[in-house]
Image: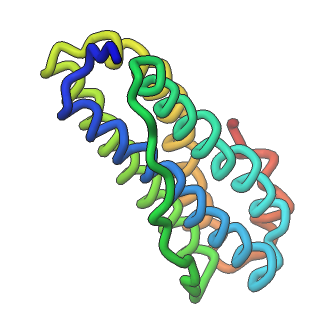
């Protein structure tokens, strides 16, 4: 079994794969709450299709493929139940943004670990993911800015197309 990746990088990648699927579950719950509890169906669908689905496919699987290509199998699971309730759409969108920024910081740290360990073959594959994900973080920041302007006005949901960048 040929392996050309340090254990520290392997562990960091494994953690990011787990974090990707955890974030998908968190955002699926967030989407469900937006849609069912607050009737913000347009916003919920945008977040679900463009952001929530990005985690398992574009991030989790891509990071896992990086390890599998060097004979490191990925362990899946350990996703706790997601049952958070929210008191407002603003709280939901702030939670979305905080979750995405937290993930971005972890992803950047994972890239730094791979770079610091001279696992440049891993690092180089992470850079496009980091760039793509930054667009999602930017979108979440804009959503928070917009909900702060709209407040509790439900027209936010019908106007989402005008400030959806993804």
Q: Quadrant of residue 38?
A: bottom right
Image-based side of 68 in relation to 90, left or right: left
Q: Is residue 61 above or below residue 71?
A: below
Q: Position of residue 83 (x, y in %)?
A: 58, 83
Residue 92 drawn at (x, y percent): 57, 72
Query: How far across and how far down the image is residue 137, in percent?
Result: 49, 43
In this rendering, position of residue 65 left or right of residue 30: left
Q: Is residue 130 left or right of residue 166?
A: left
Quarter containing the N terminus: top left
User: Looking at this rendering, what residue extends furthest in the left direction?
Assistant: 116
Q: Observer-nearest residue: 133 or 123?
A: 123
Q: 162 or 104: nearer the eye?
A: 104
Quadrant position of the C terminus in the picture? top right
- Give the answer, above or below, for where 105 lies relative to 148: above
Quadrant location of residue 152? Answer: bottom right
| Residue at 44% over, 59% down | 99
In this figure, which colouring scheme has been used for the structure? rainbow
Q: Please give left or right for residue 24 compared with residue 112 in the image.
A: right
Image coordinates of residue 29 in percent, x first then y, are: 64, 72
Q: Quadrant of residue 40?
A: bottom right
Whether 125 is drawn above or below 68: the answer is above
Residue drawn at (58%, 45%) of the image: 55
Q: Residue at x 26, y 20 (%)?
A: 5
State how many labels appear.
0
What residue is rendered at 45% in x and 40% in y?
74
């Amino acid at each position: 079994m040929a392996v050309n990746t340090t254990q520290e990088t392997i562990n960091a990648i494994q953690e990011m794969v787990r974090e990707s699927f955890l974030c998908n579950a968190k955002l699926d719950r967030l989407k469900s709450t937006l849609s069912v509890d607050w009737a913000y169906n347009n916003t919920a669908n945008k977040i679900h299709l463009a952001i929530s689905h990005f985690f398992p496919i574009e991030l989790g699987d891509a990071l896992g493929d990086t390890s599998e290509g060097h004979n490191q199998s990925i362990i899946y699971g350990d996703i706790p139940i997601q049952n958070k309730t929210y008191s407002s759409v603003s709280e939901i969108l702030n939670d979305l943004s905080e979750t995405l920024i937290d993930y971005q910081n972890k992803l950047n740290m994972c890239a730094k670990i791979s770079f610091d360990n001279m696992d440049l073959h891993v690092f180089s594959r992470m850079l496009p993911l980091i760039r793509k994900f930054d667009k999602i973080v930017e979108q979440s920041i804009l959503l928070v800015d917009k909900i702060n302007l709209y407040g509790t006005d439900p027209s936010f949901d019908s106007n989402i197309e005008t400030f959806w960048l993804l």
